[in-house]
Image (cartoon, helix red, strand yellow):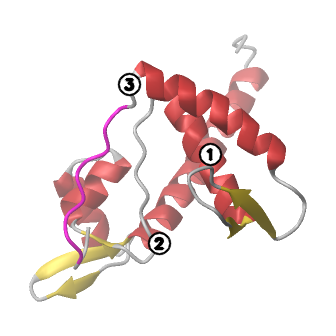
Amino acid sequence: MSATAPTPPPSLPDPRDAELARASGRLLAACIGKGPTARLRVIDGNGEIEVPVSALRMLVDILAHMAEGHAISIVPTQAELTTQEAADFLGVSRPHLVSLVERGELPHHKVGTHRRIYFRDLMVYREQRMTRSRAALDALAEQAQKLGLGY
C-alpha cells in the first residue's frame, strides 16, 4: 500500500480460527484493566510482555471481527493508497474516486505522475459522507412523518 512491500490480501478465517478468536477475545476483554498498560505472560516464553491497553483493545476488536468470519487488514493512517485501493476501500469505482479527487472533495498528492491518497484522509472523507447520509435519512424520515406516510 505504499513504498513497502505489497501485503497479501486478508483471508477469511476458517471456522476453527473464528471459534478460537471468539473464545480468546472474550477472555482478553475480561482481563483488560483500567491502567494505561497491561502485562501478558506468554506460555512459550519466560518473561512478561508489557503492552499498551489501547493495543489490547485493538486486538479484542480484531478477534471479534475474526469471530464473525470477517477478514482483517491493518492499515496505518499515514499509508498512501493508489486511486484503485482508495476506490476499493470506499466501495466505489475508480473513475468516481478520481472525479472526487479532481473536484477537490478528497485530498491527494502526486508521486511522480500518480495520485496517492493518505488513508487518514480517506477515513475523514468516509466519516463526512456517512454523516451527510445520516442527516439526509433523518430529514426524509421527518418529512415522511409530517406527511403521515407511516414510516
Report the residue at 42% width, 78% height from top.
78
The tag earlier along the polypeptide, 3 or 1, is 3
Q: Is residue 144 visible?
A: yes
Tag shown at residue 77: 2
Q: The disc labelled 2 sits on which kind of residue?
A: Thr
Horizontal side of residue 5 vs 108, given as left or right: left
Q: Going 22% across and 52% down the picture, which residue do you hit?
A: 8
Q: Which mark is residue 9?
A: none
Query: In this view, which residue lies farthest toward the bottom?
Result: 112
- The answer to which image quadrant residue 72 occupies is top left
User: How many circles with numbers are drawn on the protein?
Assistant: 3
User: Residue 119 in the image: x percent, y percent?
Assistant: 41, 68
The local crowd at label 3, few if under 14, some if 14 to 19, many if 20 or more residues have their Cα within 10 Å, is: few
Q: Indicate the position of residue 81 as horizontal and vertical percent values.
A: 28, 68
Q: Which residues are magenta?
A: 4-12
Of labels 2 and 1, earlier in sequence is 1
Q: Quadrant of residue 19?
A: top right
User: Mark 3 near mark 1, Cβ–Cβ under 8 Å?
Assistant: no
Whether residue 98 is in magenta: the answer is no
Q: Which residue is mark 3?
A: 14
Q: Nearer the viewer, mark 2 or mark 1?
A: 1
Mark 3 or 1, closer to the camera:
3
Give the prevailing secondary structure in the magenta stretch. Answer: loop
Query: Element under label 1?
Result: helix
Q: Which residue is mark 1?
A: 61
Q: Which amino acid lies under the numbered mark 3 shown in the image of this protein?
A: Asp
Q: Residue at x 54, y 36 (%)?
A: 65
Q: Nearer the viewer, residue 59 or 87?
A: 59
Residue 12 spot, x, y in % from top left? 35, 32
User: In which quadrant of the rendered image does the C terminus lie?
Assistant: top right
Most distant residue in the left direction: 113
Residue 6: quadrant of the picture:
bottom left
